[in-house]
Amino acid sequence: MCGNNMSVPLLADAVTISGAERETAAVIFLHGLGDTGHSWADALSSIRLPYVKYICPHAPRIPVTLNMKMIMPSWFDLMGLSPDAPEDEAGIKKAAENIKAIIEHEIKNGIPPSRIILGGFSQGGALSLYTALTSQYQLAGIVALSCWLPLHKAFPQASNGVNKDIAILQCHGEMDPMIPVRFGALTAEKLKSVVTPSKVQFRTYPGVMHSSCPQEMMAVKEFIEKLLPRI
């Protein structure tokens, strides 16, 4: 394997679960606000496939307007969590470039874009949607948990069309008090205007709040297995 992790800042200290055999695919998964890559590395290790590499980077620590400017891990600044809240456009675009650098690093190391899934939870899921839909590489799919599409008014124009046929698994807890399931449903409808509508799966989970659940993790596992079969 060639390529130096130090040239990609987020990769240098990312939590990476290496494959138990030759790695032929990668899942890059982005955590939510105030979290680190460790919690999702643990969750993904319970559904891991032996030929897949899982990369869970840590967000930089920045002041977050929504939380009284407290400094915490955050991919970009958040002003609100409603569809019409103002957004940190520059921060979102910069964060997407940093994730694209991870994707490029994996491609240079021999994993084709068609064998890479980008995913995330909450703010991380939002960033994974924005990054994949504006990527120059044709990726395998997106896992978008309890999240929304940032800068949604810019779509479908902001999408360059490379990922018009990308598969999207969007999941949401029906009792989510942070990002209401209605916002998730609006996001799913918006995504159908950006990609082939039949490629968007929107699943909701009764009784689940702003978190994951075993049924959701099984859906994620099946989605990854289907898109990244053993080769």
Image: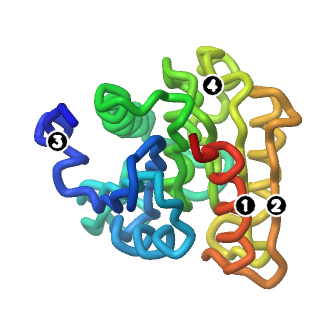
The single residue placed furthest to the bottom in the displayed view is: 207
Of callouts 3 and 2, which one flags the residue occurring earlier in the amino acid sequence? 3
- Dot 2: few (<14), some (14–19), or many (≥20) neighbours within 10 Å? some
- Where is the N terminus found, in terms of image quarters? top left
State the mark number for residue 171. 1
| Vertical side of 6 occupied by 66: above or below | below
From the image, tell me which residue sits under label 4.
154
Label 3 vs label 1: CA separation?
31 Å
Q: Are marks 3 and 1 in contact (CB under 8 Å)?
A: no
* Residue 160 quadrant: top right
Q: How many marks?
A: 4
- Where is the C terminus found, in terms of image quarters? top right
86 to the left or right of 105: right
Eye-nearest disc, 4 or 1: 1
Label 3 vs label 4: CA separation?
32 Å
Label 2 vs label 1: CA separation?
5 Å
State the mark number for residue 228. none
Q: Are marks 2 and 1 in contact (CB under 8 Å)?
A: yes
Of callouts 3 and 1, which one flags the residue occurring earlier in the amino acid sequence? 3
Label 4 vs label 1: CA separation?
23 Å
The residue that appears at 41% across and 35% down in the rendered structure is 96
Q: Which is more toward the observer, 60 or 17? A: 17
From the image, tell me which residue sits under label 3.
5
- Dot 3: few (<14), some (14–19), or many (≥20) neighbours within 10 Å? some
78 to the left or right of 62: right
- Dot 1: few (<14), some (14–19), or many (≥20) neighbours within 10 Å? many
